[in-house]
Image: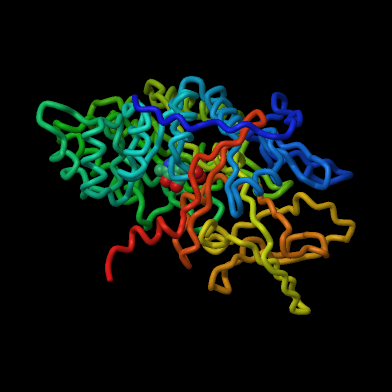
Amino acid sequence: MTHTTLPRTTRTTTPPAPRTTETRPSPAPSAATPDQGPDPLDIWPASTVPLPDEDLAVGGVPLTELAERFGTPAYVLDEDEVRRRCRTYLRAFPDADVYYAAKAFLCRAMAHWVAEEGLGLDVCSAGELELAVTTGFPPERIVLHGNAKSPADLQAALRLGVGRIVIDSTSEIARIAAAVPAGSRQKVLIRVVPGIAAGGHAKIRTGTDDQKFGLSLADGSAQHAITRVLGQPRLELVGLHCHLGSQITAVKPYLSAVRRLVGLLARVHEQHGITLPELDLGGGHGVAYRPGEPALDITGLAGKIRAELAGGCAAAGLPVPRLAVEPGRAIAGPSGVVLYRVLSVKRTGVHTFVAVDGGMSDNPRPALYGVRYAPRLVGRHSTVATEPVTVVGRHCEAGDILASDVQLPGDIRPGDLIAVPVAGAYHLSMASGYNLVGRPPVVAVTSGHARLLVRRESLADIQERDIGL
Ligand SMILES: Cc1ncc(COP(=O)(O)O)c(C=O)c1O
């Protein structure tokens, strides 16, 4: 195993005691108190504590200190929160495989933490796969996804020996089989579209028919693909997979998926006389982005899925398959915070636009899905009442809005520091090079220490790639 050991840097301030690191259940629905409303720090990492002058410490390190030291914009990742969330999953699903979905956020340290906690990894490109394996992630604990796997993706998967490949379309069956070396067999699952609508936005719903992912149950594509895979001696069909979508906050769609997939397992048994041993229910577990929003209760979800699966399999006369889940957002999202510096404040008479030094290049989610966040002024105590403002980015798009209609102090001004919680998933992993501003760094915090995991993308990095004249 090749381990990249990054230097740990020593903090300069006494670390504050965490709020309720041991006792706060997470991921879980946010608690609302009838008198005061939801706790505004509920959606922050459990280590978050208030400091004087409206500063906050995360992982024992003041956010103002992080902004000074690493600049802005910057992503802060609470290592203990990531690990705690991994453990929550392992406790909730003790007899299942938990694969962290790398697309939410991946870097070498994240791969180490997830591996050390005993999770597997869901990847969907040769890039994610190579990064994980070259940093020591066991390839047999990796599952490869993708609706359009490139030859490079498949070559890397077979060369590095991934545990499972999830077949997403009929056309890739023969292609994957042909790439498997003679004398060996590749474990595969079939991605089934169960015809269930779930997910926080139309663009992140993948359980319904007539979209680019998976093989439909309703039109017989899934059954047809199963027959085709069973006819390939170099492929070993070990189970079924489905991923309903993302940011799902209800248990019911998962139970419907279990029922439909158990029905298909029973049909496979009848038609082909085989019992598929694995059932992967994907990820999609929703988190709260703003205080008071619901989050999926993972322990409750696990118990209900187990009961549904046991009941369904007993009724169908099948053994209970080994379960797998693939959470991404629910592990990385609430573990991350992004820091921005205010660059300008513009009042039009109708709106107040607070422009910061990042934007849609480091977080395209509001523009893509209309996601709403709860930014907060940190490091300055204001006595001025809050007013509704729109936090916008620095990019050349009117739609470069990070948070519309949020409450910030009326005297918000250039130089102020703004922190946005629940920024660990699908921010940096979806970042772009728009306007060549360079992608922000990622800083890990734990026990009062901060260390750089991913450095800021510099102008030199950008220029280095541009080799033509
Ligand atoms: C196949 C698959 N598994 C897991 C995930 C992770 O989803 P989430 O981050 O919402 O848990 C995704 C997200 O797109 C996915 O496509």
Residue closer to the observer: 293 or 466: 466
Instruction: Give residue 205's position: percent from left, percent from top.
Output: 47, 53
Q: Is residue 301 visible?
A: no
Residue ID at (70%, 24%):
22
Locate the N terminus by quadrant: top left
Residue ID at (69%, 50%):
290
Above or below, 5 against 72 in this view is: above
Residue ID at (55%, 64%):
367
Residue ID at (52%, 59%):
364
Above or below, 120 against 37 in this view is: above
Locate residue 160 relative to residue 49 in the image: left or right. Answer: left
Residue closer to the observer: 95 or 291: 291
Q: Is residue 398 visible?
A: yes
Q: Which color scheme did the rendering employ for the protein?
A: rainbow
Locate the C terminus by quadrant: bottom left
Instruction: Give residue 454's position: percent from left, percent from top.
Output: 48, 43
Instruction: Give residue 241's position: percent from left, percent from top.
Output: 37, 38
Locate residue 352 relative to residue 312 in the image: left or right. Answer: right
Q: How many marks?
A: 0
Instruction: Give residue 43's position: percent from left, percent from top.
Output: 69, 42
Residue closer to the observer: 236 or 413: 413
Locate residue 322 relative to residue 226 in the image: left or right. Answer: right
Which residue sits furthest left? 182
Q: Quadrant of ligand 1?
A: top left
